[in-house]
Amino acid sequence: MSGTRVRLGVNIDHVATIRNARGGRHPDPVRAARIAAAAGADGITVHLREDRRHISDADVNLLRRAIPLPLNLEMAATEEMVGAALIARPARVCLVPERRAELTTEGGLDLTAAKESVLRTQAALAAASIPMTLFIDPDLEMVARAPDLGAQAVELHTGRLANAAPSGQGDALAELREAAAAAAALDLEVHAGHGLDYNTAGLVAAVEHVRELNIGHFLIGEAVFTGLEAVVRGMRRVLDDVAGTSA
């Protein structure tokens, strides 16, 4: 990684999950985003789902206006979501697969099956000058397809690493390294995320060409015990320590 500082995107979806469990306005995702910003986050990520199970359209629009950091909007490649993005005008859109029954995003986009919907979405976003990232598995075929679909970046799904026993992490890391190198060779910026904690985030941050990690569930869960400011600062230290070691 040659000492490059890896950006930290904080996903605050599950602040809204807690709020929605009871209704009302507490805890407030905007407040969470401001705390994350003060603690060293480089961006805020939210996933606007079809069923609005956590983040709402109103949240997206409030965050876009109220926070000092870039807003990364994760969404499916659908006409409804494009409409929401054109209203909110986030700094970036990350297209993700979405199935109503899933608890969380279970893998990357199949860029072969989703080609037409991604192209339609990219055209609408490009007309509004909104850059597009594609959330994909660390698969060389998917990486190779991304530039032709108009992506400026790919986010590599890190679920295999996150779920692996320590003895199985080497293969998952090798897969991420190979995909990151292939993406960089195609002039795609490389992001990564899904299921990362302090330990696995450090491993991925050390992968050459990775420029950004997007982390949510672990940070919000750990914040129950240590506070959101402390946990974001802790993750920022993990990423900075990796950069310092690699310098």
Image (cartoon, rainbow, N blue to C red):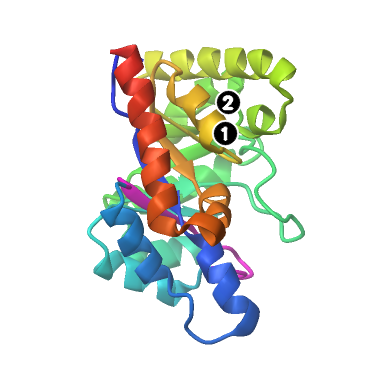
Indicate the quadrant where residue 82 lies: bottom left
How far across and down, in percent of the image, does residue 96 sit? Answer: 56, 47
Q: Can residue 206 be seen in this view?
A: yes
Query: What is the CA distance from the residue labelled 1 to the residue labelled 2?
Result: 7 Å
Residue identified by numbered label 1: 136
In the rendered image of this protein, does residue 240 appear above or below residue 223?
above
| Label 2 SS | helix
Does the magenta portion include 51?
A: yes
How far across and down, in percent of the image, does residue 240 sit? Answer: 33, 29
Tell me where the magenta segment starts and ends, as one range: 41-54
- Name the side, left or right, on which 172 lies relative to 148: right
Indicate the quadrant where residue 3 lies: top left
Q: Are marks 1 and 2 in contact (CB under 8 Å)?
A: yes
Indicate the quadrant where residue 86 lies: bottom left
Residue identified by numbered label 2: 142
Q: Of helix, strand and loop, which mostly describes the magenta segment?
A: loop
Task: Look at label 2 and name its amino acid.
Answer: Met
In the rendered image of this protein, does residue 121 appear above or below residue 101?
above
Q: Which residue occupies the foreground of this view, 189 or 119? A: 189
- Name the side, left or right, on which 170 lies relative to 116: right
Q: Label 1: how many residues lie within 10 Å, few (<14), some (14-19) or many (20+)?
A: many
